[in-house]
Image (cartoon, helix red, strand yellow):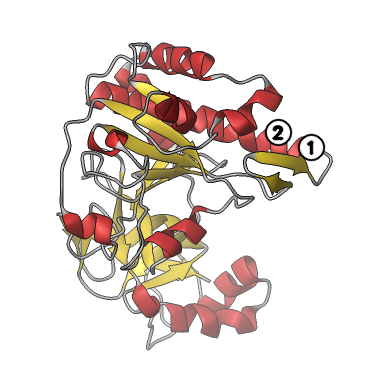
Amino acid sequence: MRVIKQLCTKSDCYKAGKSIEVKGIMLHSVGCPQPKASVFLEKWNKPGVSSCVHGIVEPDGTVYQLLPWNHRGWHGGGASNDTHIGIEMTEPSTIHYTKGAEWIETGNGEITRKHVLATYQTAVTLLAALCEEYHLNPIADGVILSHAEGYQRGIASHHGDVEHIWTRFGLTMEQFRNDVKQRMGKKDSSREKETVSSLRIECYGRLKREMCIREGTSIKEECLTTYKKGAFVEVVSKCENGWLQIRCKESTSGYGYVSNVKSAYVSLGSEVYTVQKGDSLWRIAEDKLGKGIYYTKIKTLNGLTSDILSKGFQLLIP
């Protein structure tokens, strides 16, 4: 699991600025065949929208955090907004809704099954972490609820999620709560190691200027540290608003965020190469890019004004 903090700072919900005492977590499913969280980020991060959840789960283990966890969200349509964190799970593109919460399979079923089971497991990991952070007992009455269960208790609007999509795969809320409880039983150090090690490197970057590494994808977020011009960074993912999620040893989570709006602040490449004795730009281009003539690409990417290289100098490779 990796959590990308991309707060919906333009939404009316965020601007309302109300906090809650977290007493539970409500699990939702988006209710349409859309596997990408970015669609909902774009939909909710603007004025005039009456919905906003705290987080959205994707099947690859990514969680997008849209609100501070103790911020009053607009997700349950009732009193649950005053007490519960709201978490949405994306849904596979291989289903079609026919009426209300009723849906049919449009593929062979394998993509749907994998998506549902994957988001389930990520949700277990996320809710275990949140339960630990807010000292919640996941199997206690009313702590972890689906939207449908919230409606049955009179604290949420009339929805059928998440059971409407889970039941075909033998999943239940009772099982989910027990899985969260069991997940919490693992040592924190074990889960932290798993989370940090799961940050796959998408590419590498070199800063074009001194940059503040922040806790989230906004200049309003806390500055964790400052990296100097020319510093290399390991990019975990490219966020929707032009920011980059990078490995950051100064962060307790293992990652931070740096702005690269309009590609203005970070040059990106596939790897970082350390110059060896006898190296030339031509030879490096032959080895890394397939043709020596491509040395100009390396030279341009790294802002070099000379073809002379010194042993130990680091180059960003396109």
Q: Are marks 2 and 1 in contact (CB under 8 Å)?
A: yes
Q: What residue is at 15 percent from the left and 42 percent from the top?
A: 19
| Circle 1 residue | 109
- Where is the N terminus found, in terms of image quarters? top left
**Total numbered labels placed on residues in the image:** 2
Q: What residue is at 60 percent from the left and 44 percent from the top?
A: 91
Image location (x, y in percent) of residue 88: 46, 41
Image location (x, y in percent) of residue 244: 37, 61
Viewer-side residue, 172 vs 314: 172
The disc label shown at residue 254, or none: none
Query: Label 2 is placed on what type of residue?
Result: Arg
Image location (x, y in percent) of residue 232: 34, 61
Residue 282 occupies quadrant: bottom right
Image location (x, y in percent) of residue 252: 23, 38
233 vs 229, left or right, is: right
At numbered mark 2, what does the secondary structure look like: helix, strand or loop?
Answer: helix
Residue 214, compared with residue 96, is above or below; it is below
The disc label shown at residue 113, or none: 2
Q: Specify whether residue 312 is in view.
A: no
At numbered mark 1, what does the secondary structure look like: helix, strand or loop?
Answer: loop
Residue 90, compared with residue 162, is above or below; it is below
Residue 10 occupies quadrant: bottom left
Residue 33, compared with residue 124, is above or below; it is below
